[in-house]
Image (cartoon, grey):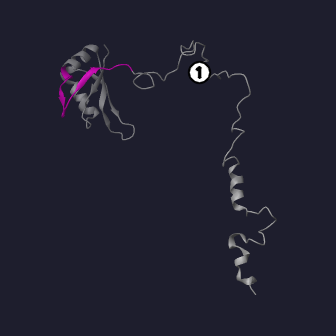
Amino acid sequence: MGKRLYVGNLPYDTDEATLREAFAQNGRVVERVHVVLDRETQRPRGFAFVDLATEEQAKQAMAELDGSMLGTRQLRVTEAEDRRGPGGPMGGGGPRPAGPSAAAGRERPPYGAPASRPAGPAPSFPPANRFGPDSRPKHERQDAKKAPRRRAGGEGPSEDYGGRRGSRRFDDSDDE
């Protein structure tokens, strides 16, 4: 058993001095108290770690303080477990050993090594065959929107049709 204790179910207003006082009763020597804070709010998260001088003192503190009341809450005092690796409560997330992969049945390259690729032409990025409204680059699409549209019959608007202004046959200026 270690001499580091986990103290859970703490009231949120508990500070280091309060814990040090509670664990120092009956002649125990408290070496360190660490109240765990929330990263964003910097407020206590409701648990802490207490390091005592000897294992006997840790056993005595567990027996006396586990289940006792501190403020309005019943404390939970147990031996602190070693830290888990990155990746959360299920472990994992740490470096993976190089070796045979059970899923593929082949050797895995070490972390950071380039993976082998199948033979053949390398994929082109962006894809060469793009279809649809976005097949041209953005600046070409915007230029096409700004340019005036021309009819197939000639350079400008035809004589019969005036484009946006309407048909020439409805203009009053030709009726003389």
6 lies left or right of 88: left
Q: Which image quadrant for residue 142? A: bottom right
Name the residue rendered at 69%, 22% in the picture.
118
Residue 33 found in image quarter: top left
CA neighbours of label 1 inside 10 A, class few (<14), some (14 to 19), many (20+): few
- Residue sitting at x 71%, y 79%: 171
- The residue drawn where x is 69% and y is 38% is 127
Please state which of residues 72 and 95 is positioned toward the viewer in this rendering.
95
Q: Is residue 153 above or below residue 26?
A: below
Residue 156: x and y in percent read: 79, 67
Relative to 150, is 45 on the left or the right? left
Give the labeled residue for mark 1. 111
Toward the viewer: 103 or 131? 131
Magenta stretch: give its range.
64-82
Q: Tell me where residue 31 appears, x and y as whole percent.
A: 31, 23
Q: Quadrant of the C terminus?
A: bottom right
Q: Quadrant of residue 80?
A: top left
Residue 66: say if magenta: yes
Q: Say if the magenta span includes residue 147.
A: no
Q: Secondary structure at mark 1?
A: loop
- In this rendering, position of residue 87 left or right of residue 71: right
Kind of residue indicated by mark 1? Tyr
Q: Nearer the viewer, residue 32 or 170?
A: 170
